[in-house]
Amino acid sequence: MKKYLMVAAGALAMASAFTVETKAQDVDTIAILTPEEGTDYGWNQQGIDSAKAAADAAGVELIVAQGLGYGDVRPTLRELSEEGADLMIAHASGYNTAAAEIAEETGVPVAIVDDPSATKEGLIGDYTLSGHEGAYLAGVLAAKQSRSKTVGIVVSGEPPAWNAQSAAFAQGVKATAPEAKVIYAVIGPAAYSDAAGGKRVTESVIAAGADVIFGQGNGSSFGMLQAVETTKAADGGKVLFIDVIGDKTSIDKGYLLSSVVWDMTPVFEEMIADLKAGDYGTKNYSIGVADGSVHLLKTPQVDDEAWEAVEAVKADIASGKVKVEPVWEASEVRSLVSVQ
């Protein structure tokens, strides 16, 4: 198990239950499985960092299995269950089928993403997370800072989480600047790590007039960022980039406008608490603006007046005055934008 990393100190507890009953249980060890390394400033890194924080807060061990790719993870899940994991967080939608099967086989609870209907009491929990409220705020910011009133959305696929953010971003743009145009482009059906594709598609969106890009891509986002760094807007000025999930300020060269940051720590903490209380698998987990698990990053590129507008809308979302409903289907997203 070359990719595994024991994060907390202490002995592993062996999982001994192979039949599932909904009852309180001791939680000594949790594990997280990620398709890419935890250095992407995005989905994988935020997941691992949040799992570490949740494990530390709960006083449990954490096993990190990272860089596993998008293939069959059943052998890895079996090994983790044998090593004593009391909860296995399958941190990729492509792991859902395998995780559910191994949970049934071993009796070890799993957490999956993007499949709320698959929850099973005591065994399978779902965290279909969406930063759609934060994406709406990003749309407000983009509309305020766009010189051309043309902004772009570039996505590495159309999973439910990306769809919800894309729709909310477009809604935020239109609510702020009804005359604005939102161009939408997809790199590929599952091009999450396609940096070259991210660069190529982002360049085409900039060529169509966009001077602010909202990018959702995991590894492909590095290509998106490279495109905005090397491509001028139609007016000869700078193109700005809004990222998702993580914080790339440490590698920014002055083109990062913001990011819709996801903090999954409260989600994983709640999972551990529910396992201990015997409530696991009875609900879905989410993140949002009200508790700070979703927030918008402010960089030096953000105009103060634009940020004031964002903060005002943020307060309205937190209070319930403005409601941003998630849109999960790609077809609905496409009805809100200009598809390229």
Image (cartoon, rainbow, N blue to C red):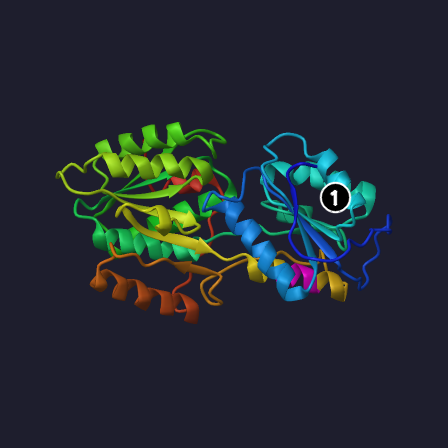
User: What element does badge 1 sit on?
Assistant: helix
The x, y position of residue 110, in whole percent, is 71, 48
The x, y position of residue 4, in whole percent, is 66, 42
Write the residue at 61% across / 35% down.
68
State the residue lying farthest toward the front.
9
Chief secondary structure of the magenta portion:
helix
Using the rendered view, name the quadrant where residue 70 is placed.
top right
* Magenta span contains residue 272: yes
- Whether 107 is drawn above or below 195: the answer is below
Q: Residues within 10 Å of mark 1 (few under 14, many from 20)?
A: many
Write the residue at 80% across / 62% down.
25
Q: Which residues are magenta?
A: 269-273
In this view of the protein, which residue sits in the foreground, 113 or 228?
A: 228
Query: Does residue 177 appear in this view?
Result: no
The x, y position of residue 62, in whole percent, is 67, 53
- Please name the amino acid that badge 1 sits on: Leu
In this view of the protein, which residue sits in the foreground, 184 or 295?
A: 295
Query: Which residue in the structure is indicated by mark 1?
Result: 80
